[in-house]
Image (tube, helix red, strand yellow):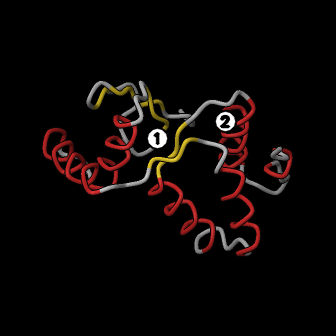
Amino acid sequence: MVNRKTWSVPYYSEKQQKAIEMVSELMNNNLGVISSQVLQEYSSVALTKLKQDHGIVLHQLVLLEVFDVVLMEPALIRRAIEIRSSFTISFWDSCIISAAESAGCDSIYSEDLNAGQYYSGIKVNNPFA
């Protein structure tokens, strides 16, 4: 059993707290898919920009493992290149869409892509808008 209360830390910014609440809700409802790329990006930001202790980041990664994890395999990377070409978006954003597409997702949460837009039939929701 995952103790989801460990996500709630009072010194987080309002934006971080909103993200924590959203992820916690998905966890509590056994919903959600995450790609290995997103786990890597999260780890990088947590360790460098947020300057979190590596032990905390490791613990948070264990918590995120309750989601279905899409591994970025070569076929998904090739698909990401096709998506990038079709929508003129960054390669990294197209990888997220490719992973979501392979998992059968109908929507993704992103603040980087255009909220409300569909990419390969997947709607983008900005949780901070």
Q: Pick the residue in front: 125 or 71.
A: 71
Category of crowding for the residue at label 2, using alpha-carbon neighbours closer than 10 angstroms: few (below 14), some (14–19), many (at least 20): some
State the separation of the CA atoms marked 2 and 1.
12 Å
Inspect the image, locate mark 1, and give the three-letter code of the amino acid beneath it: Ser
Where is residue 9 drawn, in percent x and y? Answer: 83, 53
Q: Secondary structure at mark 1?
A: loop
Q: Residue at x 52, y 45 (%)?
A: 34
Q: Are marks 2 and 1 in contact (CB under 8 Å)?
A: no
For residue 90, side relative to residue 42 (left or right): left
For residue 90, side relative to residue 112 (left or right): left
Q: Residue at x 32, y 50 (%)?
A: 95
Inspect the image, locate mark 2, and give the three-letter code of the amino acid beneath it: Met
Disc 2 target residue: 22
Disc 1 target residue: 110
For residue 2, side relative to residue 61 (left or right): right
Which quadrant would residue 127 be assigned to in this image?
A: top right
Q: Earlier in the sequence, mark 2 or mark 1?
A: 2
Q: How many marks?
A: 2
Category of crowding for the residue at label 1, using alpha-carbon neighbours closer than 10 angstroms: few (below 14), some (14–19), many (at least 20): some
Q: Secondary structure at mark 2?
A: helix
Name above or below for residue 46 compared with residue 65.
below
Q: Residue at x 46, y 42 (%)?
A: 111
Where is residue 118 drawn, in percent x and y? Answer: 31, 26
Q: Pick the residue in front: 62 or 21.
A: 62
Quadrant assignment for the N terminus: top right
Where is residue 106 drawn, in percent x and y? Answer: 41, 24
Q: Residue at x 20, y 52 (%)?
A: 78
